[in-house]
Amino acid sequence: MIKAVMMMNTQGKPRLAKFYDFLPVEKQQELIRGVFSVLSSRPENVSNFLEIDSLFGPDSRLVYKHYATLYFVLVFDGSENELAMLDLIQVLVETLDKCFSNVCELDIVFNYSKMHTVLDEIVFGGQVLETRSDEIMKAVEEISKLEAASNSISLVPKSVSGWRGGR
Amino acid sequence: MEQLKTIGRELAMGSQGGFGQSKEFLDLVKSIGESRSKAEEDRIVLSEIDILKRKLLEPDVPKRKMKEYIIRLVYIEMLGHDASFGYIHAVKMTHDDNLLLKRTGYLAVTLFLDEDHDLIILIVNTIQKDLRSDNYLVVCAALNAVCRLINEETIPAVLPQVVDLLNHGKEAVRKKAIMALHRFHRKSPSSVSHLVSNFRRKLCDSDPGVMGATLCPLFDLISEDVASYKDLVSSFVGILKQVTERKLPKSYDYHQMPAPFIQIKLLKIMALLSSGDKSASEMMYMVLGDLFRKCDSSTNIGNAILYECIRCISCIIPSPKLLEDAAEAISKFLKSDSHNLKYMGIDGLGRLIKISSDIAEQHQLAVIDCLEDPDDTLKRKTFELLYKMTKSSNVEVIVDRMIDYMISINDNHYKTEIASRCVELAEQFAPSNQWFIQIMNKVFEHAGDLVNIKVAHNLMRLIAEGFGEDDDDADNKLRLSAVESYLQIISEPKLPSLFLQVISWVLGEYGTADGKYSASYISGKLCDVADAYSSDETVKGYAVTALMKIYAFEIASWRKVDVLPECQSLIEELLASHSTDLQQRAYELQALLALDARAVESILPLDASCEDIEVDKDLSFLNGYIQQAIESGAQPYVSERERSGGMFETTDYHSQDHHEVTSHALRFEAYELPKPSVPSQASAALVPVPEPSYYSEPHQPISTSSSVSERESSEIKLRLDGVKQKWGRPSYQSSTSASSSTPPQAANGTSIRSDGGGVASSSSSKPRSSYESKKPEIDPEKQRLAASLFGGSSSSSRSDRKSSSGGHKPAKGTANKPATVPKENPIPVPDLLDFDEPTGTSDVAATDPFKELEGLMESSSQDGGGSTDVMGLYSTDASAPVKTTTSVDSLLSELSDSSRGTYHQSQTTKGPNSKEALEKDALVRQMGVNPTSQNPTLFKDLLG
């Protein structure tokens, strides 16, 4: 099972963090900081794997990939395959790249909810759900389209009154 | 108008798809990006929180604005600040009809709330409604929330809907429904136990994606209960076969591999199902063999599958051919330049070595390279491998390496682990006692604060007991060498507390035993320790008790005792100590010095730490006292069972219990007395709960490291028997000690004995039996490895030394066996690698494995085709379920060619658009998100 997905930049600022078991905010921060301090001390050209029992409990592994200014991090337990997880990061990044055409840190920061949409299509409740980036793209686009449609219909006439009515 | 402005800005930002944010959000992100310190960032976020608090309270917030606020809240919380004031607005948003808002609401609540949060109750109803929605995206969003927000109590509220969704028209929904059900199963297996059959059924879903999703829950179910899923082996083999034969739609290919994630999951499941099952294992020989041939080892995902095959083979009962394939794959991994593959290779080696111990032999150089590698992860993995392949012939080199590494790292977590591994290996395979003590000294010196206290007790026990052989000479020699090594180490600065305790104890017991060192020399050293670590009361306690033993031995042998002036001042200092424990020890020491030789000898007999003490559990020695008390009007003892009417509370019980022994009222009072001086002690002493420990007897010092010492551990033990000292101390001090000081001393003496004795008695039972039970699994293989690795090389002197020094433990009798095999230094020594290696693989596969497999192939392929019609549904050309190998091969090559072509194409179209990238880069800089590289195509390495 996948325990967490994180993206953080090379200065340690979290850009996206999703934990598949609920953790209080403070604990999340502690883990993010812990992961960053380990990652930032890794030299270049070493393996992408880490055994990270000290932070996430026994039998926890971490796979990370460093792209330009970002670290992509997956934390998971012994029931996953490290190399496959590395490819899952690849799937995620490829999908984001399609989504934003040449994705960069800024896209991730500003499209927070879209990031989550993409991620939710790939990993669902800690399990790998979909790994075909075309399919993921299709789903995400469909969501965007429908959201845009529901927006354009409801926004102007209904939004204000609807909200009032709701209260 | 406001909205129009926002949209305009979005367009200017160049972000796509209607997810855009307003200027405020961009500003927030920008200013946080530019902040130079954590404090500055916090200030920005705090002011943002103020703004949001205010805005959320405004009446008539437009929805669009509200959505934006929620996103800002999520962002703030990700930065580690509390956004709970806005949770309710997120909850409200989930009720909205607008899909965008609803999804935003769900996103926010899944990130904000945990399943037991109070607000969940407000969402359950919405979730129920949304699960029935016509819009499958709404259903998906709700399922997402279900996964995260539904706890054991609310499962029944949504379960029927989720089960209905298993048959939804959209495969995306079916997949997510399965995952949700899986999540329920994880949270509360009982609530969905009647639905488990659904997972089996969904394995035959018409959509391969749904089938793939079903593998996740099945993996969990099978790992819990293998037996009831054995019937699925042939189905899984059939599915895997069809996947590898590319019967799935091409969209499932990833980097030219057909559905690799499904393959990996299947291999994992098959490993579970066929573990130790010969017939199930045989069913998968062919498909595994195929995988080794087909997997493209030039891609990462291909290697992932290869690794999974190795893992699978290490679990099942493999054929020699498969083992050979696996070994070959491992050697490819190890020879690769990629650290990731090396890591996987080392891991695979560690797994296969259990089955075929000679596999490591050909990779010695590679293993040593990994050990020298700057990559910590790889290094640790290699140490794990070495740990697995340690045996008595190579233990010295491996443990030395481990200790060197242990000294070099700062990570306490791993330091602890590797220290405990060193200790374990040393205990198990030590070639000589001297070596064992040296290793323990090193471990204590460098990781003394991290190792378990039981390790220290083991060592003390070992030194005290000798080694289970009736060779007093050897024992004495060992003790002397221990004493000598400690006298050397003792003057080094900053030794860990635990180590000092061991040193003090050993010096006290055996410092003067040999006559080589004078009492005054040893006692001077002990005083130095007590002085140098004056803040550590445990060490001081050990040191004082050690002093007492030294003096007692002197008195008992009718020698005149000169108490050193520094000793005298130490005693005086401790007499006034805040710690009652130290005070008592000092008083006891003082009293002992005044006694004559015979009395002292019976208090502290020489080298008696291993003697068992007899404990009178019936407390018959108190009978007279009780009789006397009853005669003078005391109430007789009422046993706990008789009191069970609930009349007495625990304190009453204690007071009454105590009343029998002394006239004091509350037992707890005496217990709390020593504690107020040092706050940290209070908790330790007030909670005398023994840790669950290695031995049968409780080890108080584990929990009360600050003040309690060897004697107290025995007191805890003795508490059961009623001879306790601390609990009953008031009685001693008030009455008994006035008449004579002997009784407490005697108690003290026995308690010291009992410490050693208790350890000793447990030592002869538990640990040893555990070794013995361990031995049979490990040893034969290791011996074979030793023989195959080092056979024919010159024999070393070690075997001689070992036989002279004797076994470290009786269990080592078995470990000693390899000594008959001529041995040389083990694997990790490079200079020894030039030795001719015996050919280890000559005996494998005498018969042609393919011949053997051919028969299997037919039966299993028929089997697969018959039982799992499933895959026929996926493939477009399902008419021929089993193709002949040649046609498959040709088809394969065609397929891979064409797919490769498309891949290249997509690459070119996807290639970096430098103009766009440059613009983006400029924007990044402008926004204060400093990219480290000058390269404008930030993700160039993405496709490389």
Image (spheres, rainbow, N blue to C red):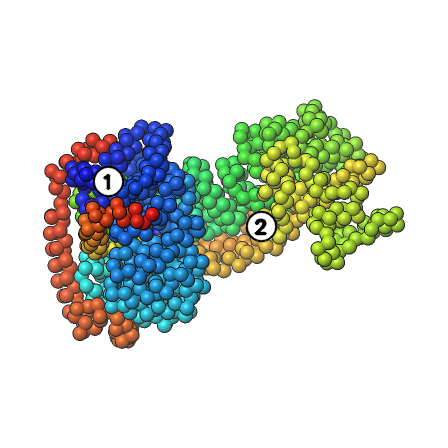
Q: Which residue is mark 1?
A: B21
In this image, A140 relative to B424: left or right? Answer: left
Residue type indicated by callout 2: Pro
Indicate whether B426 appears above or below B5.
below
- Rendering coords of residue B489 (x, y %): 55, 32
Indicate whether B17 appears above or below B287.
above
Which label belongs to residue B643?
none
Q: Residue at x 31, y 65 (%)?
A: B166
Q: Secondary structure at mark 2?
A: loop
Q: Residues within 10 Å of mark 1 (few under 14, many from 20)?
A: many
Indicate whether B147 appears above or below B668.
below
Viewer-closest of A68 and B497: A68
Which label belongs to residue B692?
2
Q: Residue at x 59, y 54 (%)?
A: B766
In this image, B414 relative to B346: left or right? Answer: right
Q: CA distance from mark 1 to mark 2?
A: 56 Å
